[in-house]
Image (spheres, rainbow, N blue to C red):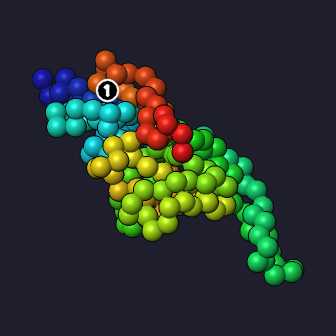
Amino acid sequence: MSTSRTIARKAFIRLLLRNSLIAATWLPPILFINTHVVTIAAVKGESMSPALNPKVKTEKDLVLLDMWTIKGPLVELKTTEEPIGASPTYVAQSNIQRGDVVVLKSPMNPENKLVKRVLALEGDQVVTRPPYPRSTVRIPAGHVWVEGDERFHSRDSNEYGPVSVGLITARVACILWPFERFGAVPKGGRLDYGV
């Protein structure tokens, strides 16, 4: 009886070691993909309603976030203020387009993540809404203008101004849940009316 227990114990330990080795082999690629390529996230709040969370009181949308294609190649940032002989400054060229729904670090508190729609890119002129202090603003290089689709429940560029593309961490690729809304994020916001 004790020899059969010993054999069973050794078989269990071999199986445990084998499965641990398999898990250890797969863990780094899974963590890399989840951290740098794609991940799944729940959207909180009503600032993007009705495109996201139309039933904010009863359910949260689950979305697939694309973190890989959001950043483009490095390009030299050319400015007129740069002194002669200064080292060039390089920035990641953005693959962000008007209408993209993105995840960004809050300019007011970088530990908070926001989900907003990109309304304007660098060089564009935007007609702002209160509480922004000016009626129009031209978006500076390396920045975008973001707004929530639900204007009365959104803290966005109308409050904190143009946002650095460096704060954008992901693009919402599609809605995963609820299943009846599976697919691309619906268009919305002021893009429907022009900026």
Tell me if 132 is positioned left or right of 99 in this view. Answer: left
- Residue 139 visible to an observer of this rendering: yes
Instruction: Name the residue located 54 percent from the left edge and 60 percent from the top edge.
Output: 136
Tell me the quadrant of the picture where the C terminus can be found: top right
- The answer to whether 193 is drawn above or below residue 165 in the figure is above
Q: Residue furthest top?
A: 180
Graded by Cα atoms within 10 Å as few (under 14), some (14 to 19) or many (20 or more), the crowding at tag 1 reads some
- Residue 23 visible to an observer of this rendering: no
Instruction: Name the residue located 49 percent from the left edge and 37 percent from the top edge.
Output: 193
Q: Residue furthest front?
A: 135
Tell me the quadrant of the picture where the N terminus can be found: top left
Tell me if 116 is positioned left or right of 55 in this view. Answer: right
Where, by quadrant of the figure, is residue 107 drawn? bottom left
* Image x and y of residue 91, in percent: 69, 60
- The answer to whether 157 is drawn above or below residue 64 in the figure is below
* Image x and y of residue 37, in percent: 53, 40
Tell me if 172 is positioned left or right of 121 in this view. Answer: left
Where, by quadrant of the figure, is residue 89 drawn? bottom right
Of 116 and 27, the residue lying toward us: 116
Of 124 and 16, the residue lying toward us: 124
